[in-house]
């Protein structure tokens, strides 16, 4: 019996979260609507197979962070064996999406843009 793949999805848009749930229905998903929630999930999961990150988290408030905070956490604070195997950045904010991808790739994280 094969292991069910795991994924963390960070997005504050409920409709987009529903799309992820439909697209990744064969995964065990952890959904986070804030950067703090995503970082907490990363710290408590042995290793996700994938993480899907948004940048702009409009409903989280200015002190809750954004997707770049999660990318920084993955790149700087997580050992290679605890990082998600792949990170997909799906932000509609193109300049920040590119910055997140560049940061993650510089840290050796397998990263790609992703459209929802």
Image (spheres, grey):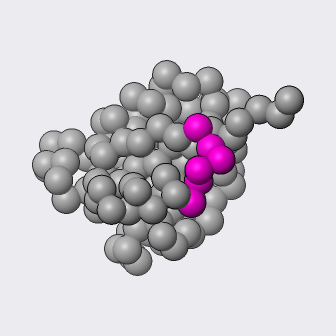
- Magenta residues, start to end: 23-28
Tell me what residue is drawn at x 41 percent, y 35 percent. 39
Q: Which of 110 and 23 is in front in this view?
A: 23
59 in magenta? no
Does 41 sit above or below residue 69? above
Instruction: Specify whether residue 108 is in view.
Output: yes
Magenta portion: prevailing SS class = loop
Question: Above or below — where is 81 with respect to 107?
Answer: above
Can residue 54 be seen in the rendering of this structure? no
In which quarter of the view is residue 15 placed?
bottom left
Q: Where is residue 65 in the image (x, y as percent from the top left)?
A: 26, 46
Number of marks in picture: 0
Q: Locate residue 12 relative to residue 81 in the image: left or right.
A: left
Quadrant of the drawing holding the N terminus: top right
Q: Specify the farthest residue to the bottom.
A: 94
Q: What residue is rendered at 62% in x and 24% in y?
A: 46
Q: Out of 73 and 57, give the one closest to the viewer.
A: 57
Of residues 112 and 15, the one nearer the viewer is 15
Q: What x and y, as percent, mark residue 63?
A: 16, 43
Q: In this view, does 29 lie to the left or right of 56?
A: right
The residue under the point 40% across, 77% down is 94
Along the viewing direction, whichever of 39 and 95 lies nearer the viewer = 39
Q: Is residue 46 above or below residue 11?
A: above
Image height check: is 39 above or below 100? above
What residue sits 40% from the left and 67% below the top? 91
């Amino acid at each position: 019996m094969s292991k069910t793949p795991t994924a963390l999805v960070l997005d504050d848009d409920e409709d987009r979260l529903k799309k992820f749930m439909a697209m990744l229905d064969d995964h065990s998903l952890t959904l986070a609507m804030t950067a703090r929630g995503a970082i907490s999930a990363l710290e408590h999961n042995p290793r996700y197979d994938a993480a899907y990150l948004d940048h702009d988290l409009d409903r989280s408030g200015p002190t809750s962070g954004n997707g770049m905070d999660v990318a920084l956490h993955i790149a700087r604070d997580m050992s290679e064996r605890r990082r998600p195997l792949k990170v997909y950045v799906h932000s509609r904010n193109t300049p920040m999406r590119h910055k997140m991808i560049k940061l993650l790739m510089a840290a050796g994280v397998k990263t790609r843009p992703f459209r929802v």
